[in-house]
Image: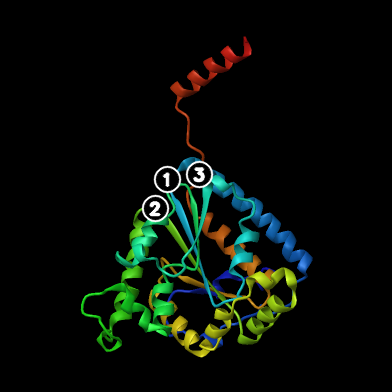
Amino acid sequence: MESILDLDQYRYAGKKKLQLATWPTTIPAKLATSEIKSTIDKNIKQLASYQDKLYAQSRYGVLIIFQALDAAGKDSMIRHILSGVNPEGIVVNNFKTPSKQDLAHDFLWRVHQVFPRRGQIGVFNRSYYEDVLVTQVHPEILLQENLPGIDQLSDIPTDFFRTRYQDLRHFETYANHCGYMVLKFFLHITPTEQKKRFARRIELPEKNWKFSAADIREAAFWPKYQRIYADVLQHTASNDDPWYIIPSDDKWASRLIVSQIINQQLSTLPLAYPSTSPQRRQELQQILRQLETK
């Protein structure tokens, strides 16, 4: 399993042009589901240990970003691999259509409102990257932002999105400087697999609630989304904040890879429980003696 799960193969730092069509959507060999689930269970316990120290230390923060096309498995990914963490130390947010209040501010304003505090793991189920993804497929959305000099589509500068890419890179560098680790995952599936999952949402009554006709409409833009995703990932990946492109046609395999990467990266942080001074230990011993005499 070690050779199959060479995690570096999923890491993309943006040094070469990205062709998503050349990146796998499946792992090279079939692993037993029982073995995958067993390893994920171990990873969940390990992550809980890291998170406990992260929360107690309250010095570092972690932001985990999941980006993908519809039905790639973001919700179930979050539900499974983060199932063991203390709810006090995690916050999950979903970046949907900007509200009127969001649109009255700069495009990163809403990010600051929900950014995790120190000691927390923040999860963005979709993220601020929507502001350079969906807006390129549907540029008319930008007209709602009341941006200076942009009153119609022809007013959008040719370098508009390159500038936003730069803003996002700077934002993540700023977060790094403040003690935050940013982990970015793109769940990569084929259009064939997406169609299968849409069909299951229709065929299975318990999944009907997940089906949206809007998802089908967006699926028609698959080739365009693929080109734009490749461009976005290429221009916002770096050595410090790479993208991890996860083969996700098999949900269990993708969960295994993501959980391995998260634990691997958290292991690089100097996490530890806060130390207790000699004076504080004396105070605690005195309190303990008082408790024992009652």
Image x and y of residue 10, in percent: 55, 74
Discs 3/2, front: 3
Distance between the alpha carbons at the discs numbered 1 and 2: 7 Å
Report if the CB atoms under discs 1 and 3 are less than 8 Å apart: no
Q: Residues within 10 Å of mark 1 (few under 14, many from 20)?
A: some
Q: Residues within 10 Å of mark 2 (few under 14, many from 20)?
A: some
Give the total number of marks visible in the rendering.
3
Q: Residues within 10 Å of mark 3 (few under 14, many from 20)?
A: many
Q: How is the image coloured?
A: rainbow
Q: Give the secondary structure at mark 2.
A: loop
In which quadrant will I find the C terminus? top right
Position of 47 compared to 95: left or right? right
Image x and y of residue 96, in percent: 47, 68
Q: Which circle's residue, 3 or 2, is located before the other in the chain?
A: 3
In which quadrant will I find the N terminus? bottom right
Residue for point 44% across, 74% down: 13
Q: Give the secondary structure at mark 1.
A: loop
Report if the CB atoms under discs 1 and 2 are less than 8 Å apart: yes
In front of the other: 269 or 115: 115
Distance between the alpha carbons at the discs numbered 1 and 3: 8 Å
Outermost residue toward the left in this view: 149
The residue indicated by pointer 2 is 179
State the image quarter where residue 31 is shown. Answer: bottom right
The amino acid beneath tag 3 is Tyr
The residue indicated by pointer 1 is 59
In front of the other: 99 or 65: 99
Report if the CB atoms under discs 3 and 2 are less than 8 Å apart: no
The residue indicated by pointer 3 is 55
Distance between the alpha carbons at the discs numbered 3 and 2: 14 Å
Residue for point 41% across, 66% down: 240
Using the rendered image of the protein, determine whether residue 118 is visible from the camera's viewpoint: yes
In front of the other: 80 or 146: 146
